[in-house]
Image: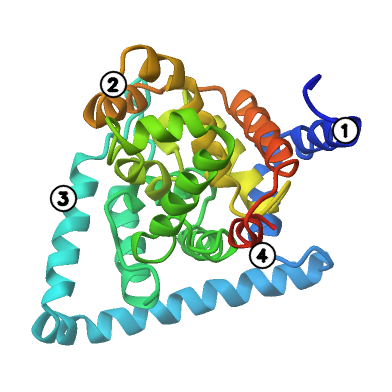
Amino acid sequence: MTTLSPENSLSARRSASFILGLHPLVRTEAWKFLTGYYSWQSSRDERLTVDSTRRKNYKVLCEMYEKIQPLLENLHRNFIETRNNIAYDIQRLYDKDPLGNVLIDKKRLEKILLLSYVCNTQAEYQQGFHEMVMLFQLMVEHDHETFWLFQFFLQKTEHSCVINIGVGKNLDMLNNLINILDPLFAEHLRGKGAGAVQSLFPWFCLCFQRAFKSFDDVWRLWEVLLTGKPCRNFQVLVAYSMLQMVREQVLQESMNGDDILLACNNLIDLDADELISAACMVYAELMQNDVPQPLKDFFL
């Protein structure tokens, strides 16, 4: 804080505390507002109507899928391949808690993923979606809620976790961010560490799900992403903050790209609050720099 101007220091403090986290008892309902499932201005009766409509629409989509499934199997090779990929991913998914209790219904999860693949032409199925949707299924009770929350989450986060839409842009902006804020590290990454940043695409594809010590930490970060505070595309600032955790080791040991990737993959059991605070500080620092317009537009 002492390295920042008083104005930006205050801004950083406010950014770091803009959301205190949601209590588990209110998370399910709160997420419906954060994602846009419900309007913030809606009354209780209006929300009951909206939920009923979303349930009916989900049922219609399921019925439509059952009707066109034979057609998809005969005419679209990608459908059969994707269905097999989904089945394989779900089969490998660990679905029990430490006590051996079953956490999720894999059949229901498979159905939701297939329906999402068929209905969402922007975000075709990619490996990792099964883990993301599992967290939605753990949060809510009904399949229609899981389906719509996932769709709205993708929209609200500008499809930033989708490979053919947002992931590549995130990686490019992460490179730009390193060049501006840490030229020494950027020089190493361009040289001996070439390719390391581009190899970090799983961070974005999974919205950092594997980096945290608990599901609560994952939900905590995702809630921040949904608020759009302190800025758009906050996920890139999170990735930069994680890279800074291995920076000293990378430079001291003069690591190459593969070793840097291994060090990054070893970033697990992180605390969401600490990471969010670090990313907010990066944002405050960035705003003090002469930022190129494309980068500024990306965050503002």
- Cβ atoms at labels 4 and 1 below 8 Å apart: no
For discs 1 and 2, the disc positioned in front in the rendered view: 2
Please give left or right for residue 247 compared with residue 48 in the image. left
Do callouts 1 and 2 mark residues in contact (Cβ within 8 Å)? no
User: What secondary structure is marked by label 1?
Assistant: helix
Front disc: 2 or 3: 2
- Looking at the image, which is closer to me, 72 or 125? 125
Residue 244 picture location, percent across and down: 50, 25
Give the secondary structure at mark 3.
Answer: helix
Residue picked out by circle 2: 255
Q: Earlier in the sequence, mark 1 or mark 3?
A: 1
Mark 4 or mark 2, which has the lower sequence index?
4
* Residue 10 disc label: 1
Q: Which residue is label 3 attached to?
A: 88
Q: Quadrant of residue 46?
A: bottom right
Residue 48 placement (x, y as % from top left) = 71, 68
Q: Residue 110 placed where, x, y %? A: 28, 57
Question: Badge 4 is on which residue?
Answer: 36
In the image, residue 249 sits, relative to residue 141, either above or below, namely: above
Q: Quadrant of the C terminus?
A: bottom right
